[in-house]
Every structure is written in structure tokens, then in C-alpha cells.
Amino acid sequence: MKIFASGFVAAALLAGPVQAQQLSTPTGPQAKLPTTSLRIVADNGKTYHFTVELPVTQQQQDTGEMFRTSIPANAGMLFVWPRPQVAEMWMENCPVPEDMLFIGADGTIKAIAQNTVPYSLSTISSGVPVLATLELQGGLTATDDINVGDKVIAKPLDGG
């Protein structure tokens, strides 16, 4: 997954003005990143547990899930933005579908893009300002009945 910023991983102008830095173009999956525990508490009371990777550098965010051929059902990647903003993602060099959950500053899911199209360069937008984007295995939100309005709890979102 790419963000639109100064090059890649999808979130238009994520960190503000473009910094003058040279980022290498990824040609393969990045090594596993540091992880944190994350829970989603659904309106029906059910809680789902995940271990998610945390891309923090621009290069890590730009590479995201690119070139990875699977996303485990209990894993994902959490992109936390420096401030709430409209996040815009795409699927360049991503060979498997993803569910993208757009998380507001209050920790609730504001929008979900289900089963994104592998390798697509089409913009996938949160449509509203969000604090984070969570990428999970494609189809998981439908299978687990995870919906807009459900609560996401993780330390990087201030509620861990």
C-alpha cells in the first residue's frame, strides 16, 4: 500500500510540507516492523484482537504492505498520522486485497474500504479527517462483522 505524500504510502500530505529527503523505491517487502496490540470492540460487544506493525518513518510508511503475499487474520499494519487528516491510500505493488479501516481521533472507525483491488493505483480515501489507517486482511471486516462506529483501542491511538 502506498500513501500519497512526497511519493508513496497513501495519505495525501500526511505529514505536512514535503521534506527534502531521498527515499529509495522499494523492490520487495520490508522486514517486519515493531508491533503493538490492537483491539476492535464491535457494537455487538464482541472484541477482536490483532498484533499490528507500526510504520513510523517515511520509508516504512511508503513501503507499507507492498510486495507481501499474505496478511494473517490476526495481524495488520497501523498508520498513525501526525494530526487528523483525510487519508488517501492506494494499492501499488500490493498483491493481496486489504480492508482499510479509517480511524477518527476519538478511536471510532469512520470509514472502511473492503477488499481493495491488488495493484490498483486508484485513490482510496477516508472521505473525512482521520487520525489513523488500519490495514487488515481483505474480507476480514465482513467476516467478523466489523463496522463503521466500532471502537479501535491501541496505545498509539492514546487509549491503549
Image (cartoon, grey):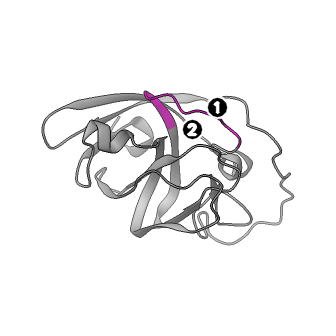
The amino acid pointed to by label 2 is: Leu
Look at the numbered disc 2 and give the secondary structure of its residue: loop
Q: Count neighbours of disc 2 (C-alpha within 10 A) and say few if under 14, some if 14 to 19, many if 20 or more.
A: many
User: Residue drawn 68% across and 56% down?
Assistant: 92
Q: Disc 1, disc 2: CB below 8 Å?
A: yes
Query: Where on the picture, by quarter, is residue 158?
Result: top left
Q: Which residue is mark 1?
A: 33
Q: Which residues are magenta?
A: 67-76
Label the magenta part by its dominant secondary structure: loop
Residue that carries the numbered disc 2 in the rendered image:
54
Establish if 36 lies above or below 23.
Answer: above
Residue 94 position in % (x across, y down): 65, 48
Does residue 149 sit above or below 144 in this rendering?
below
Image-based side of 10 in relation to 25, left or right: left
Q: Which residue is at 18% across, 32% downward?
A: 46
Q: Residue at x 73, y 66 (%)?
A: 6
